[in-house]
Image: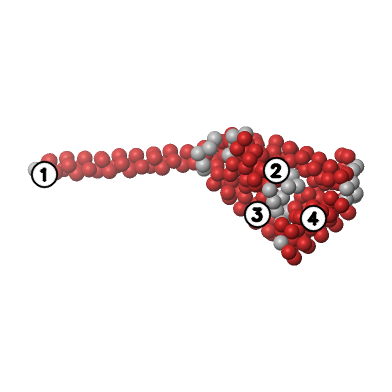
Amino acid sequence: MHLLAYKQWLILLRKLKRIARSKGSAHSIAFGAAIGFFIGMEPIMGIQMVVAAFIATILKANRIAAILPVWVSNPATFIPLYGFNYWIGYKLTGWGPGLDEYEKVLKQAEIIAKESGFINGIIEGSKHLASLGTGALASLFIGCTIVGIVSAVIAYPVCLRAVEFMRHRRQIRREKRHHRFLELLKKHEEKTSGNKSEEEIAG
């Protein structure tokens, strides 16, 4: 499970690097990523990408940059992620059962997901969670919202600097290639000019 989560993060980082090469502004990309990380923390797996794309469209952020980070919550990470988010909400409110009981629900959802598919795991897990009462649901959503806000606040400046850095480095490489091309062109012209001078002298 940990290896799968690590691979998911690597895939996410590679795709974000591709987005950095797109034509959108650095602000639009970073804003989209911040939206994605916020939505990725919310307990709405199954519709996260749609919600992230919708919000990004309304707020004029990069939609692709918003969709990718929602995969921070995936089959390999949702138990520790939502467990932590619930713990934050529970500590702040005291609503719902303790963390041990909540983790049992998540583990039941994981077992169902392995046996009958991830979507069924989400559905059954939601039913089990609802059976814990409105206090548990409130603690989960409060914790997810707080962690989502913190994630978004961190993601925006980090992604903004990363995109600006990658674009600056790319621009430097382009200028170096252009400079080398001009040098080669100059040498070629000098060589051609020298050959013509020799032919004129010989003639």
Crowding at dot 1, Cα within 10 Å, few <14 / some 14-19 / many 20+, comes out as few
Residue 74 rendering spot, x and y as whole percentages: 70, 53
Three-letter code, disc 1: Ala
Q: Which mark is residue 125?
A: 4
The numbered mark, 4 or 1, whose residue comes first in the sequence reads 4
The CA span between labels 4 and 2 is 19 Å
Which amino acid type is marked by label 4?
A: Gly
- In the displayed structure, 118 sits above or below 174; it is below
Give the residue drawn at x 90%, y 42%: 94
Q: Position of residue 181 (x, y in %)?
A: 36, 42
**Mark 1, secondary structure of its residue:** helix
In this view, the mark in front (2 or 1): 2
The reply to whether callout 4 and callout 2 are in contact (CB within 8 Å) is no
Q: CA distance from mark 4 to mark 3?
A: 22 Å
The earlier-in-sequence mark between 3 and 1 is 3
**Residue sitting nearer the eye, 174 or 78:** 78
Three-letter residue code for mark 2: Ile
Q: Which residue in the protein does label 3 denote?
A: 8
Q: Quadrant of the C terminus?
A: top left
- Give the residue type at disc 3: Gln
